[in-house]
Amino acid sequence: MHIVTDSSPNDSNGDDDDIFAATAEGFQHMLEMLGGAQAPSWEQAAQVAAAIASNGVSEANIDPLARISFEQLARVASLQVAAATGFSLIENGREIEVALITRTEWCSETLSAYRSLFEPLAGSLGGSIRLQMGELTEEDVDQIRQFLPSGANLDLSKLVSALQGAFGPALAAGLAGTVVGQLGSRAFGTYDLPIPRLMPQHLSVIGTALDEFSADWELPVEDLRLWMCLDELCHHAVLSVPHVGSQLSELLTEHARSFSLNEEKIGNYLQQLDLDPSALASGSGLEAFQAALMQPGFVLDALESSKQAELRPRIDALVTAVEGYVAWTVDSIGSRLIGSYSQVAEALRRRRIEADQATQFVERLFGLELTAAKLDTGRAFIDGLVQRAGVEVLTELWASRDSLPTPSDVVAPGLWLARMGIEISSELDLGEGSFEVPDFPDIEEQ
């Protein structure tokens, strides 16, 4: 895992080409499959994902003693989370388990869990690309090739030829293998991304990822493992509430199927760059043009549809509330059980908000933006509810679809309380030296 700030362990010295170079091998491998007799299968996608996630290095089996120790911590965490949230962690008659696994196993589980997102995602992306590829000439392909960064070592002619006849399941598997591999190279557990999973056999934590992070940050590994158990179980508890999981899944699926190439946005963006066409033609402006194309926001902005723009505030509202609730619950439990809690929490907070460009790209591909500002908004929303109406109000937050927060609610806890008809308690502490200010947004006169 790499955190790219001056004060973080294991600073990365890579350049911007890493976002392409890290996955170029995976794309090329899938490309070879596309050119073969059969389209790539999900089993082949899992192989590609595992190779990317493990950087091609063979993984050792989980140490049995570490597995036993982890299972004991998971049982402690399960009891604490069930008591704190009031949610049942019993599924199919047995308590949900948290298991130590390898990156390869994580990739296999995640591919299966995310398949319902990758298929509509590939369908909408493929439809947009197909329209453009039908108009490409060999001269166009040559012009595109010169703009690619050095890390993207792809055979574009072969890519165009193969993809023209291999959309749908083939593109879904190819995209999934590369994306899950990128996620797996950095993931810690099942809910690194807050995406609901339908009845998982167990929750998973990547053992070597925790060991490496513990060593990098000089954290007690047992404390880190317990924190991860709490975090995974809290995420699972709330995302397994039927109407919470189904609402978020519906929003993410609709986002995945709504990509559409926006040529006007591309044109406007390139105009803002103020690139000299003659410089591009001569090659002297290629570096600036490549740098522009390397920005994750450029690619996804170019593919964003009006439907996705409508969905994003609703996705943000639900995800930020979930993340705020999980953070509040883990804090309330972990601060009592984990000796080095403040150090562990700070290290993991920074890991979350200092994700590299490739990770940010993948998050946005799914319709998620887990920025520091949005995570802080979610936590402030939960804190605001508790300060105004007590801990018990959190049960009401997840009681029904109607009680799930709206975009207006998450920035103003008082609005949610008013919408639910919950009175603010005058006996609760509203904060140091604070006085109650109505949580209604300012309305400017038109």
Image (cartoon, helix red, strand yellow):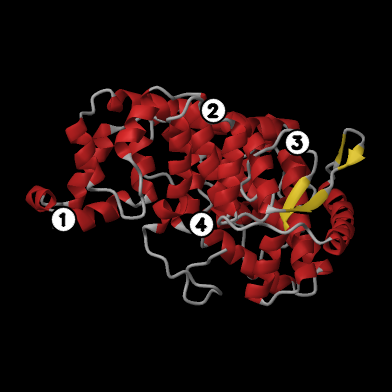
- Amino acid carrying label 4: it is Ala
Hey, which quadrant is residue 376 in on the image? bottom right
Which residue does the image show at 44% across and 33% down from the upper left? 308
Which of the marked residues, 1 or 2, is nearer the chain's N terminus? Answer: 2
The relative height of residue 258 versus residue 60 in the rendered view (above or below) is: above
Which of the marked residues, 3 or 1, is nearer the chain's N terminus? Answer: 3
Left or right: residue 340 compared with residue 261: right
- Amino acid carrying label 3: it is Val
According to the picture, the residue beneath numbered tag 2 turns out to be 119
Quote the CA–CA distance across marks 2 and 3.
24 Å
Marks 2 and 3: which is nearer the front? Answer: 2
Which of the marked residues, 1 or 4, is nearer the chain's N terminus? Answer: 1
Left or right: residue 327 compared with residue 278: right
Is disc 3 in contact with disc 1, using a CB cutoff of under 8 Å?
Answer: no
Marks 1 and 4: which is nearer the front? Answer: 1
- Amino acid carrying label 2: it is Glu
- Amino acid carrying label 1: it is Gly
Is disc 2 in contact with disc 3, using a CB cutoff of under 8 Å?
Answer: no
SS of the residue at dot 3?
loop
Which residue does the image show at 80% across and 74% down from the upper left? 339
Percent of width and height locating residue 294: 33, 52
Which of the marked residues, 2 or 3, is nearer the chain's N terminus? Answer: 2
According to the picture, the residue beneath numbered tag 4 turns out to be 373
Most extreme residue toward the front, as rendered? 37
SS of the residue at dot 2?
helix
